Amino acid sequence: MTSEGWGTPPVEPISQHYIVCGGNALAHRLVLELVEHYEVPVVVLVADRTRDHAPRIEQLTGVAAVVEYPNITEEALRAVSIDTARGLALVEGSDQENIHAALSAQGHNPNIRIVFRMFNQRLGENIERLLRNGAALSGSATAAPAFAAAALGRPNSVEIGGRYLHIAFDDAITPDRICVVADHIDRQDLSKIRLLPEQEGDSAEFVRLATEFGGDGPVRPGGARREPGPERVPERAPEQVSEPASEPEPDTEPGTELEPEESPGGVAALQALRMEPGEPISWARRLRWRVLDTMRFFTSARMRLTLLTALAAVLLAFSVLWYLSRDFGWTVYISLLDLAGAAQPDQPADIAAGTGTGGAWQRAAQVVITLCGITFAPVATAIVVEVLGSGRRGLPRNPSAGTRDHVIVVGLGNVGTRVATQLHEMGVPVVCMERDPQARGIAAARALGIPVVLGDGPFEEQLRRARLKHSRAVVAVSGDDATNLEAALEARHGNPDVRVVVRLFDDNFAGHFYKTLDNAASRSVSYLAAPAFAAALMGSEVRGTLSVFRHALLIAELTVEDGSGLIGLNRHDLEDPGGVRVIAVRFARSNQLHWGFADRTRRLTPGDRIVVAATRSGLARLNTVLVEEGG
């Protein structure tokens, strides 16, 4: 990598390269994906080489050049040789800045592949139509499902063909699983996990039995015939190198055979559901929360005493009226009029003539009800004004006494806003915490009616206000690892049973986190999103990312086009233990998706589509086939 020429074109002429604009965590991970897995030349354009991840990007082996410009201008694009580049990734800056840069890049190089980050996905879809070869992705939208699912203690899902793919572990695995995606799972040493281990074919069971019993066939002593079961976890498979985020490699040497009883840890499998699992909340719990939520207006002990006294007086007066009239309907009618101050009192002439509506006890009861009505009216008015006025003032509401079994989201940046919104749409109560009153997510939370705790005080106090004692999980997704870890530790100190989910970039940090805390999970936004950006830069479509602890499993859909390097390949050619597993095929002649297509010799033709589960390096290999052989 050259170290001179900052702010000027690269020292050595370069072409057919990929440009990454940005110096944040996502840019760092994306550059790693491109140079390590795709092995393509990369030029990085940063605003300041001394800030954020720019110094670490500069040290990466395989980066052709790093160019410094404060803004992505025409001059900056020429400095990174935009005219001869194959792809451009815009992963930093505002939506408006990225749109302007994408259109400018297309003006310089009409055939360049452009992938740009957009928070506003609807606007991104419209901008895609203005570009010849562009894709708009949202890093926060890609990563948010993993955080939301982790907060609820379940795996996230990816929708493919009307089914929802998710990862199941150990006892949760059902016989109709699609395939095994990981084994050797040791929660104390995640480096031992093997992703997409080699699996046995459908006839492996018969071959083993035939070998064991010779010519007698698969018959057990005593006449019991052993039926072949569903796909089994491999009993003898060569050790594969997993692809976690910079985790150390397995201790076992390649080729070592492990019997099932010797295999450490558990197993993970890919399964499909007809519908995404919801988060059922009973009507009784919702009613209880609503009643408790209403009580937030009566938090003052003096006010509660006054209102309870007035209510008792009204009930007593109502009983007197009912006793005297013996007519329940009339009693309710006159009581409501008295509460509203609209009853017609007896006139002195009527009392003297004996034509009044009631005796002295009845008139006394009406007076009591009327006076109590004077007490209730201002309180009801204050409640209405508070409910309507807080929304008009643009202020988020604080969590109330009815906030129970909720998830606390710390940080209302792009990711925090997405996570809070997704949990709210699932019907899960949410409370947000944010220190910056100008954060963009505050308006979104207010529009959804989500309570927000604002302030720059200690986390202990902020979490108390967010009703930590009654929460089910805390999701810390600010942009700083130390802040997120502090919030998680404070949450666990205040509520030892609460589940904590932390956004962490540093893998060593995450490893210590898993070893130290139980009922906890960590996710990296850049690690989850970078493979999708890299694949999109190469022309593939990543439908979603599934998490196996800190490991990412990508679900991608590839189209076999005319001239594509995929033409003529079959499952044997495509699949790679530890890298790629074909899970579904859609042929050009039909629109039906075939799950677990058994014919491993059928060759792909133009128009076919395949759905694969892949590691980062495995998907990179497929994309290399598309780019080099099909390009």
Image: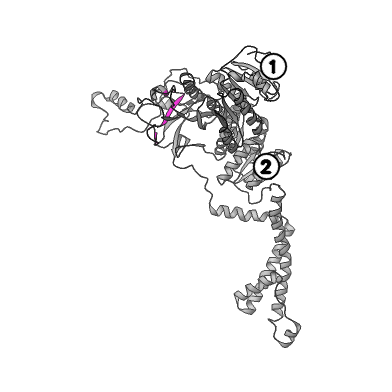
On screen, residue 51 above or below 325: above
Judged left or right of residue 452, residue 560 is left
Residue 413 image position (x, y, % from top left): 65, 36
Residue 66 is situated, as x and y percent measured from the top left of the image, at: 65, 18
In the picture of the structure, the residue carrying the numbered disc 2 is: 442
Residue indicated by mark 1: 6
Q: Nearer the viewer, residue 403 or 605?
A: 605
Between 330 and 587, the residue placed more toward the observer is 587
Can you see residue 572? yes
Question: Residue at coordinates 65% horizontally, 38% vertically from top-left?
Answer: 410
Residue 580 counted in the magenta span: yes
Which region is colored magenta?
A: 574-595
* Residue at the extreme left of the image, as rendered: 215
Which secondary structure lies at badge 1? loop
Q: Can you say which quadrant of the picture contains the N terminus?
A: top right
Spot occupied by residue 572 in the image (x, y as percentages of width and height): 38, 23
Binning the other alpha carbons within 10 Å of mark 2 as few (below 14), some (14 to 19) or many (20 upward) gives many
Element carrying mark 2: helix
Picture quadrant where residue 70 is located = top right
Q: Report the coloring of the rendering.
A: one colour
Q: Pointers 1 and 2 in contact (CB under 8 A)? A: no
Picture quadrant of residue 256: top left
Q: Height in image: 618 above or below 447?
A: above
Looking at the rendered structure, the kind of residue marked 2 is Ile
Q: Classify mark 1: residues with Cα within 10 Å, few (<14), some (14-19) or many (20+).
A: some
User: Toward the viewer: 503 or 594?
Assistant: 594
Amino acid at circle 1: Trp
- Counting residues from the start of the chain, the first of labels 1 and 2 encountered is 1
Q: Is any part of residue 505 visible from this angle? A: no
Residue 302 falls left or right of residue 331: right
